[in-house]
Every structure is written in C-alpha cells, then in structure tokens.
Amino acid sequence: MGTWRTHFIGELRSTHVGQQVRLCGWVNTTREHGDLLFVLVRDRTGVAQVRIQQSRDAGGDSRLWATAVELGLEFCVRVTGTVALRPDDARNPDMPTGDIEVTPVEIEILNDCPPLPFPIHRETEISETTALKYRYLQMRRPSLARVIRLRHELVLCLRNLMSGMGFIEIETPLLTRSTPEGARDFLVPSRVYPGRFFALPQSPQQYKELLMIGGVDRYFQFARCLRDEDARADRQAEHTQLDFEMSFVDREDIIEVLEAIYGGAAERFSSKRLQRIPIPRMSYHEAMHRFGSDKPDLRFELELVDLSPVFTGCSSPSLAKAAAAPDEVVRGFAVPGGGGWSRKELDALVDPATGTGGIAWVALKEGALRSSPLKSALDGDRLDALRRATSAGPDDLIIVAGGLRRKTLESLGRVRVAMGRKLRLIDEDVLAFAFIIDFPMFEWNADEGRLEPVHHMFVLPKTEHIPLLDTAPLEVLTTQVDAVCNGYELCSGSLRIYTPALQKKVMGLIGITDEDAQRKFGHLLTALRFGAPPHGGAAPGLDRLLMVLLGTDRMSDVVAFPKTYSGRDLLMDAPAEVDPAQLADLHLRVEPPREGV
C-alpha cells in the first residue's frame, strides 16, 4: 500500500490484533476521560478508535500525549501503532471496527483544521449554499461518501454489462457544432476562427448515428451532456447518460438492453423491490389518459377515468363543451375519504400557481353531495352517474377537470400525485418501472405556428405511419420508447431515420428549409447516402437512475459537484468574469445588458 499507510481504517478487524499499522485520515471526534483520550480517526472506508493513556506515557515519550491533546476536529493525521482488542464492556457492535482499537506509538499532525462551517461527524441539516460552497467537506460525511462510491460501482457494473453484450466504448467530441436539438446550446468561441463557435454537446446523437454508418455496430459511452436550460431538483445543466446505439435492430432489441440495464441495477444497488418483471409497457395515450403523465408514478392507484358521458349536455358550458369536442376531455378520479376535507384544503387543489388550475371537486358525505362548485351541473341522476364512473365511496372526494386534452390531463396528473403523497398511498419500497411507447411524432407549437418534434427530428416513425407524414402528420406515431420509474423519466430512445429522403422530409415538416438542412446537417445527410444501416439506441440517465435507486428527489444528492438551481458553481464561484486579454484573443467584447433583458 506504500509508505504512508499499511491499511485503510475501515478494514481493521479482530484478525489484525497484534499487528503494527500505519493509518492516515481525519479526526472524527475526540473524547477525554481522566488520563485516557479516545480519538476516532476516519478515512473513506470507516472509522476506528485510537486509545491514548497519559500514565502509560509518563515513563516514556510524553510527546505522544502532548500531540494527542492538540488534536481538533478534521485535523489530518497519521497514526502508527498496534491493533488491540477492546475490553468486553467497551466493544461497540454498531461499528464495523468496534471490537478493536489502536494503541499508538506515534501520532503525526499532517495538517490542522480551522473551525468548521458545519459538523462532519453528525448528519445535521445544512443550507444548500453552505453545502455547495464547502462540497469537499460534505464529501467527508459518510452519507455522501457512500453515494460517490456507489456511483463508481454502478458505472463499473454497467460498463461490464455493456461490454458483455458486445458494445464498444467510444468517446465522442465535446467540441461540436451548434444544431437545433431542443434545448439551448452552451457556446464556445473559437480563437483560431474569429466569429465562429463550437457548441458543447446536448447529447452525442449525431455522432452515434455516424458511428453506426461507420460500421461500429454496437457503441456505448458514459457521455457528459450539457444544456443551457434552467435547473430544477431533478435536472442540472450538465448530466451524465449511458449512451448506446446499435445497428440492424428493432424497438424490441432496444427494450431488451434497457431491461438488462435497469433490472441489473435495481437488483444489485437497491434494497427496493421491482414491482413487476418483465417491465410493463404502456402507450403514450394510455399513460396520459390513465395517469395524466407520460412518466407516471405507478406505485399507487387513483387512475383517471372518462367522465364525458356524465357531463354531456350538463348546465356547465365548459364541461358540456369539453365532453363533446374531439380535442378536449373530461376526466377525473375519486380520492378515498376526501369528502370531509376543509374548504382551505379543497381550494388548494385549484391553485393556478401549482399548475392545477381548472380543477373542480365534488365532496360527498354519506353518499350525498356535501359541497361542490359543480353543484348546478349535477342535476338529476348525474351525481349517481359520477359516483358509479369513479367508483367513489360514500365519503370520498371526486376530482373533475375538463378542457383541452393535454393541459387537462397534465393538470389532473399533478393533482393525482399530490393526493398520493397526501394520503400516503405511495409505496416507498417499490421501484415501478415502465416503458412508454407509441409517442406522437409531432406537436403543434401555437406560438410559432408550426409543427415541432415531441422528442427530436431523428426519430423513425412507425413504418405504417410514414404515409401520414403527407396527409396527417399530427397522427404519426413513432418508434420512441421512454423508460420511466416512480414518476421520473429515466431514458429516451428510438429507432432512427436512416435514409436521407425521409430525414429531409421530417426536417421540412418542422420548418427547416433544404438550404438550412444542408448548412446545419449536411454532414449527416451526406453520410446517410452511403449505405446507412437501420439503427437505434437510447440514453439512460445515470444521475436520475441513482436518484431512484437511493430514493432521493434531488440530483445534487448524487453528483459530486452540483450547481445551484440558478446554474451557479458556488465552490468555484462560476460563471465569472474573465481577463480582457482573453476576450481579445477570442475577438469578443462584453456589452452591458440591455434594459429589460
């Protein structure tokens, strides 16, 4: 192990008793008891007790005791001594090293430590600002140290898995061309080519297609992806994905690889149980209409049901219209025992700030109507029909919404998840994976008056839907498959367009002219002409997979050096101003922000 140390601290056991050891680490805690001083020393593998007795040093080297009493929390030290058994009444069964202690002959202070911004030996709450500014100190806490180790083991497991399935690991460039792929690019100005820019990759999408055209057949990498978009709890501007692509495959082949990835990761790295094996599949239409989300949380029921027949011709103009219009829906679900909730709790369901505007409720008491903003629309036998449609109990709450299809379904989906949490219906010990398939290829961007791809422009439509590109593009379904788990999207993948004519047709439908297509994607369109094979792949997100396995809802919990929600690196104080000489080298100047921008 070298001259600095003979063992990692957490490795010490009773089998090492009598051995002389050298240990390096940090002072976790100190405790003085008469002429005894107990020091817990820690490295990334664990902690062990060092026992120093003043009277024992009286006839020997008194410098040992003098050094020991100087020790403060997080001092960096090296301890040389002999492993001994603790007395029977002093053993600690809660510590892996609790049967032994080290009797030192030398303690070296390698570096001292000032007062800490937060305790490391106790898992106390700390603010995000403090945690990110001193991330290197937070890493010394066992909780984060375990996550960093787990991430390494997961990557190693997946790397071996992919290699065992015949994939070749290849790194693709980080400096590439800016192309319209969805999110905003991070741009890198070129010093050598003034006025021109590289872009950091949002994904290796085009490179991995080019690898297939190059005959690689099966490729993977742990790809760093960067997107200049606002952060949130489960998303950061930079993330890591297990990117893979393969030739001569169909969608089932992609799903088979994803099942191996997620099944293997769940079995080895999570104490949670898989809800169903094989992983179930569900169409996008089914997911939206049953759960109000294309990444549904399947750990609890509360499924949305069709209420259009109940409200057809009712006195509520909005619900009557939604029940009859082909592009609108009326759906809802019953909340067990919610009929007795207060008006304040009920009003919280329709808060536009939470994205749940347009929701109405029907509160029941002993089977009768207790209160509802829809009271006038529930004339005749409509209340009984509503109860039957939702299978509502006598004291349940019925949630109802009607309007434009997607907006209404998403609003109900958010309320459904909120109710699952409020009622504690979610089984936190379950991993509920699903594959969502049969996505629409396009959606209508009303603000810009054009079609735009639901996923990206390289997704291959289902073969039988290709003719619809000319007549009804909004009805086209694709070969896309998303892997979801516990309400998170973990992965998107698909078969890819592999002929230049079809690729140019899709580009034209989303408003990319032939001239722009050649200028921005000429390299890909040219490559597709040279015998491009049918191919497809996916990109499982490593960070979100770790979040799900560990049961956390924050990506910052599974990333070594995360950024804030506003995209700042508090540790490095970045982004930051740069020297004017650097800007001059890049032929750039910084203008003051325009008013209102």
Image: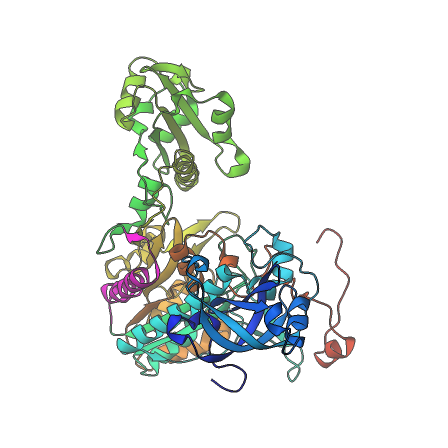
Using the rendered image of the protein, determine whether residue 454 is visible from the camera's viewpoint.
no
Camera-nearest residue between 406 and 58: 58
Q: Does the magenta stretch include residue 266?
A: yes
The image shows residue 484 at horizontal and vertical percentages of 35, 54
Front-lying residue, 132 or 186: 132
Percent x, y of residue 529: 35, 79
Q: In which quarter of the image is residue 535?
A: bottom left
Q: Can residue 550 be seen in this view?
A: yes
Residue 391 sits in which quadrant?
top left
Question: In the image, is residue 268 above or below residue 587?
Answer: above
- Classify the position of the C terminus by image quarter: bottom right
The answer to whether residue 160 is magenta is: no
Asked whether, in this view, residue 364 is left or right of residue 568, the answer is left
Give the residue displayed 31% in from the left and 12% down from the top: 380
Of 218 and 14, nearer the camera is 14
- The extreme front residue here reads 59
Provide the residue span drawn in magenta. Answer: 249-274
Q: Along the horizontal axis of the image, is 310 left or right of 94?
A: left
